[in-house]
Structures are given as structure tokens and as C-alpha cells.
Image (cartoon, helix red, strand yellow):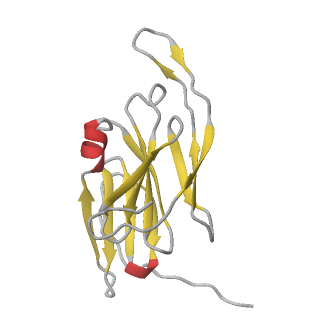
């Protein structure tokens, strides 16, 4: 019988960390949290150097400021995906933004359903699958808005270049 064991190789303090995805080729970690998106590098000695990126404050001309980042995913080619939810999540559709998993450079984005909560790159294909929670919300006027839950299938082509551009 094979004995399994493991040990911690590194640790970093990242405020509000919620969901992580590891990009092996560059030893980088995308971290979605209550404080936004962080990219962290894992050094050979186990040290981790986190760098917070200003996505929610600037994405979509500030339309997502006050919103949330609910999930991140990476794929072997170096592409990362980030689910972004606007503050009025039941009235405005969320988006999934593509980023370079090594640098954090922002690339293309796609509108998805209401309150995107999880995303994953489909194995051996160029598809990103997004689960949209569709959570109810009580509007300022007291009415209940209850958008439908759904999934979104987003075709993804290419990888971000040094300027953050992802070719179609």
C-alpha cells in the first residue's frame, strides 16, 4: 500500500482570499477574494510574493466597483478566467474576464448570466463553462427580482500577448 504524505511549501497573507487556481508552468497562483484579484508567485524556496491587481475598481469603466469576484480558473496554456459580479447582481448580468495567468494582464471578456459563481476550462478544448447562480435580490422599491440560474459556454481562442490582447 502506498503511503501518502505532504508538507506545506509556502504561505502568504492575502486578505479576503476565497478561491485559488494554480498555473503550474509559471508557478503562479490566481487568488479571488473580497479584496479583489491577486496574483502570487511561488518561488523555489517556498516564498510567495503576492501582488494585488485593481480589477474590480477599473473593469468596465468602473461598472463593477463595489461588486465581487467569485471565482478564478486557469488552464495549462496560461489563460486565466475571473468571474465578476456587479453590485446589482440580479439586475445586471455578470461577466467572465480572461487574464494571462502569469502576468495578470487583462484580455477579452464575455457577458454571461446573473451572478456568475464558478468557472472552469473544459479539458482538452477551448471552452470555458460558467455557472450563473441567479440569486434573488430585493430592489430599493421593495420588489423581489429573481433572475434564472443558468450555465454559459464561452469559446476561448488564443492566449494573451504581452499587451494583454487575446486574439479571436
x and y, in percent, of residue 138 in the image: 47, 18
How many numbered badges does the structure rendering display?
Answer: 0
What residue sits 30% from the left and 54% below the top?
15
x and y, in percent, of residue 149 in the image: 62, 35
What residue sits 33% from the left and 38% below the top?
64
- Location of the C terminus (image quadrant): bottom left
Residue 134 can be seen in this image = yes
Classify residue 37 by image quadrant: bottom left
x and y, in percent, of residue 44 in the image: 33, 87
Classify residue 98 by image quadrant: bottom left
- Location of the N terminus (image quadrant): bottom right
Residue 9 can be seen in this image = no
- Which residue sits furthest front? 168
Looking at the image, residue 58 sits to the left or right of residue 133; the answer is left
What residue sits 37% from the left and 51% below the top?
33
Check the image and report above or below for 117 versus 159: above
x and y, in percent, of residue 19 in the image: 45, 56
Classify residue 167 by image quadrant: bottom left
- Which residue sits furthest top? 141
What residue sits 25% from the left and 39% below the top?
61
Check the image and report above or below for 2 versus 50: below
Looking at the image, residue 117 sits to the left or right of residue 122; the answer is left
- Which residue sits furthest right? 1
Looking at the image, residue 108 sits to the left or right of residue 145; the answer is left
Amino acid at each position: 500500500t502506498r503511503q501518502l504524505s505532504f508538507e506545506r511549501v509556502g504561505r502568504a497573507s492575502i486578505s479576503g482570499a476565497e478561491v485559488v487556481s494554480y498555473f503550474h508552468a509559471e508557478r503562479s497562483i490566481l487568488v479571488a477574494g473580497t479584496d479583489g484579484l491577486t496574483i502570487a508567485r511561488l518561488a523555489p524556496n517556498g516564498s510567495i510574493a503576492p501582488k494585488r491587481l485593481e480589477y474590480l475598481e477599473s473593469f468596465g469603466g468602473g461598472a463593477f466597483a463595489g461588486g465581487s469576484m467569485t471565482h478564478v480558473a486557469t488552464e495549462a496554456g496560461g489563460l486565466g478566467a475571473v468571474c465578476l459580479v456587479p453590485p446589482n447582481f440580479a439586475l445586471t448580468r455578470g461577466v467572465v474576464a480572461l487574464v494571462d495567468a502569469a502576468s495578470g494582464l487583462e484580455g477579452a471578456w464575455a457577458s454571461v448570466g446573473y451572478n456568475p459563481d464558478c468557472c472552469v476550462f473544459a479539458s482538452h478544448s477551448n471552452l470555458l463553462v460558467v455557472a450563473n447562480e441567479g440569486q434573488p435580490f430585493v430592489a430599493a422599491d421593495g420588489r423581489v427580482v429573481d433572475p434564472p440560474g443558468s450555465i454559459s459556454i464561452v469559446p476561448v481562442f488564443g492566449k494573451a500577448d504581452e499587451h494583454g490582447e487575446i486574439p479571436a
